[in-house]
Image (tube, rainbow, N blue to C red):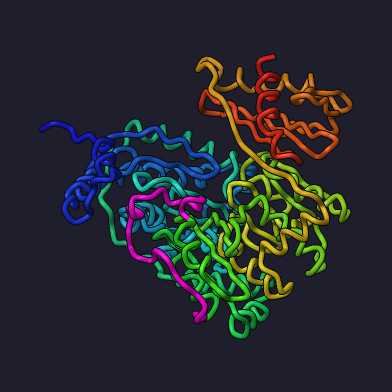
Amino acid sequence: MPKINISKIWKQIQSPDFNPTRDAKLVEQVKEAAITSTGAANVSFGTSGWRGEIGSEFTLKNIQVVAKAILQIYKEADAATLEALGVSSFEELQTKGLVIGHDNRLLGKEFCEVVADQFIKASVKVYYGGEMPTPEFSAAIELLGAACSVNMTPSHNPSDYNGIKFNPADGGPAGAEITDKITEHSNAIMKTHAWEKLGNISWEIIDPVKIYKSFSEKQGTIKYGRILSLLSKESIDLVCDYVHGSTRGRPAALLNNPQCLTNLRTETDPLFGGVAPEPSSKNLAGIKKVLDSSKSRFRLGVIFDPDGDRIRFYDGTREIDMNSFGAIAFHYMVTWRKEEGVLAKSVATSNFANIIAAKLGIPVMETPVGFKNFRPWLKRNASPKALIAFEESDGITGLNNTLEKDALFGLLLALEIMAVTGKNLGEYLDLLYTEFGRLYPERSGFDVDKSLVGAPLLERVQKIAEAAKPGSQIGIGSKNKVVKELITVDGVKIIFNDDSWMLVRPSGTEPKVRIYAECRDIQEKDDMFATAKNLFFG
């Protein structure tokens, strides 16, 4: 019998000609392959977990391997690894237990059962929350006192992917000291592993929505009273687009199902209606259609990705991405909430918040890309604490909240800001532009020879720093700009005296160089990209 080409079937499923009723057999073929396949896969477990094609790489048998690898880490952990995991021993894992759940992709529960089976056989307590967005895992770990979580999701990847995220006892994304070991053990076990039949799945069912709300109220992160007053008394339209993801039903539950709430794309659809399930400008079309015709004084639209760790906003007049909302949120926490702490942001994120922080006298912790790098300022015992931590790829969290990206927090904070200030997000942003000026962020990049992937590419990028020392001048089009600051925590970021900047980052896995730039004058972006490329090639 000829081997089924799963990638080819997925292309048919994701083609414009696909009809869910007529072509249901194609989806069943993928599911059957994922359940029965005995083929191996190469596991690469980074901060955002391991992601693979459902039916060829991401199969029940291969997930069983990853579960075994995680358990092996706990059983063999030295003192440093136990500290990273947040437990004192394997026995503590057994007692405190694992939180497990999934987004709404194909076979989410079945994949969870495979992982749970391995943990149950190792006498580990297992909590199952069913369909759960990412922030609910972090809240459940903390509120239940669990040792860790396994989240079956590839975040915003297309429907042909599934993934698995692992969080240790603090609820934040696992660092490299853990994920490198998961990768190593998984690939070693993969070589000889044969499928093991499942036993009795005796897990404890939990209510993750109730847990998340209890956690949020306990932490005092969000002022619910202010939000509920806005929703009940003011003229407001709130629109949430879930793109068929796991955040569906959450805003209604958290906000007592207000009449002003319109929900979009709530149906169960593991194929996401054929769209890329991400909080993109294109996917905001449904929200815009509702809010552009709204006559209400307050308007807010939000779109989530499938696992609820990314969010983007629309206020009836403009799209507001995380570069802008992160700055709004930070300014609000300092000036309206009068909270004390620092700003945490990734190096590739807009410097608009940096400019605000400088004028307010607040320190900025600028980190490499990756939410795990915010952990030092988000931990419960952190000093100082981050008021807001965000990255340009639509991820945010804040003071005393989860250590993970939390789109629900983004929604709730946006509503609180509107309730307290009496302004829509765009109105607030305009006031910030008036006081602090405006920056225009852009992204670009270029391909390089495959031989440069890895260390050679990193070395080439780092050489840019030699030509961009503080005080030196660099030509940008017809202008010569003076370098004010140089940051090399993740690539090379050159900040000029006029607050414009460029960042050159190497890809760690592809023959690509990524360029981020931000200018006071939007017309400068092409000159910034050209200069960055010239600096790379020397």
Residue 267 in magenta stretch: yes
> In screen coordinates, is 50 left or right of 159?
right
Front-most of residues 481 and 485: 481
Give coordinates of residue 323: x percent, y percent: 66, 50
Looking at the rendering, which quadrant does residue 512 occupy? top right
Tell me what residue is drawn at x 43 percent, y 46 percent: 157
Residue reaching furthest left? 1
Give coordinates of residue 204: x percent, y percent: 41, 69
Looking at the rendering, which quadrant does residue 302 occupy? bottom right
Front-most of residues 143 and 502: 502
Give coordinates of residue 124: x percent, y percent: 44, 58
Q: Is residue 101 visible?
A: no
Residue reaching furthest bottom? 233
Tell me what residue is drawn at x 42 percent, y 66 percent: 264
Q: Is residue 249 visible?
A: yes
Could you tell me how many numbered marks the image carries? 0
Residue 331, placed above or below residue 193 = below
Front-most of residues 421 and 151: 421
Residue 447, placed above or below residue 317 = above
Question: Which secondary structure dominates the residues rendered in magenta?
Answer: loop
> In screen coordinates, is 326 left or right of 246?
right
Residue 385 in magenta stretch: no
Tell me what residue is drawn at x 50 percent, y 17 percent: 450
Looking at the rendering, which quadrant does residue 36 occupy? top left
Front-most of residues 358 and 59: 358
Span shown in magenta: 257-283
Tell me what residue is drawn at x 42 percent, y 37 percent: 186
Q: Quadrant of the C terminus?
A: top right
Give coordinates of residue 70: x percent, y percent: 47, 45
Residue 178, placed above or below residue 302 = above
Q: Quadrant of the N terminus?
A: top left
